[in-house]
Image (tube, grey):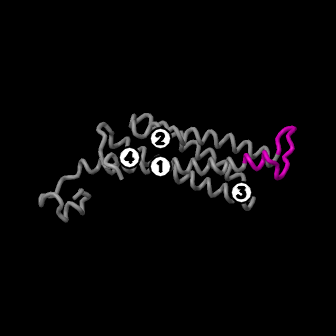
């Protein structure tokens, strides 16, 4: 781990960091739940309506996270928050395409096992993986900032640098 990982960038509001941390954790949780629902749908043919409905829960959580990160103006996180936002929109489009190629729509008749169906469904799964991964990375980066910010406010041990008490309180020896 590089030195930058442990360095603190000034100017972060503790309240905004905690809000971003909470929303990032929620986003990871609902994205993981949606991924499980998608697996049940793909491999067992179950929970179709739950998967469709929960997609909007994921969308809402990612939008709230995106707005919170950009509102906090934490430069280290803003570009990173753009990735889940873009991926969730792509995921919705791929999901709509997967729906059409599986169930048909209007004049389009679904053909089981067609190249288009396989390609869209597989792309939908891969994009779901990427969405989950980028959400986890955003959460980890946020947790790092919360941790580094809390170290600045932690008093040093009166016994000096490198003492056992300082190690227990999170000080670096």
Q: Are marks 4 and 2 in contact (CB under 8 Å)?
A: no
Q: Which residue is mark 4?
A: 18
**From what the image shows, is residue 58 above or below residue 78?**
below
Judge the density around disc 3: few (<14), some (14-19), many (≥20) Cα neighbours within 10 Å: some
Residue 61 location, quadrant: top right
Image coordinates for residue 158, horizontal then vertical, percent: 12, 58
Residue 76 location, quadrant: top left
Question: Separation of disc 3 and disc 1 at Cα?
Answer: 26 Å
**Residue at the limit of the structure toward the bottom, as seen here:** 164
Q: Earlier in the sequence, mark 2 or mark 1?
A: 2
Q: Which residues are magenta?
A: 104-120
Please say whether residue 112 is one of the residues in the magenta stretch: yes
Indicate the secondary structure of the residue bearing disc 4: helix
Q: Which residue is mark 3?
A: 41
Judge the density around disc 1: few (<14), some (14-19), many (≥20) Cα neighbours within 10 Å: some
Q: Which residue is mark 2?
A: 80
């Amino acid at each position: 781990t590089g030195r930058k990982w442990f360095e603190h960038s000034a100017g972060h509001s503790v309240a905004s960091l905690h809000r971003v941390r909470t929303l990032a954790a929620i986003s990871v949780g609902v994205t993981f739940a949606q991924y499980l629902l998608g697996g049940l749908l793909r491999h067992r043919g179950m929970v179709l309506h739950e998967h469709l409905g929960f997609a909007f829960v994921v969308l809402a959580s990612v939008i709230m996270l995106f707005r919170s990160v950009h509102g906090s103006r934490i430069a280290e996180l803003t570009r990173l928050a753009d990735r889940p936002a873009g991926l969730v929109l792509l995921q919705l489009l791929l999901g709509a395409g997967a729906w059409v190629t599986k169930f048909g729509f209007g004049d389009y008749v679904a053909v089981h096992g067609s190249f288009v169906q396989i390609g869209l469904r597989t792309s939908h799964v891969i994009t779901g993986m990427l969405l989950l991964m980028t959400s986890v990375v955003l959460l980890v980066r946020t947790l790092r900032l919360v941790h580094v910010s809390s170290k600045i406010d932690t008093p040093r041990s009166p016994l000096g640098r490198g003492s056992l008490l300082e190690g227990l309180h999170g000080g670096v020896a």
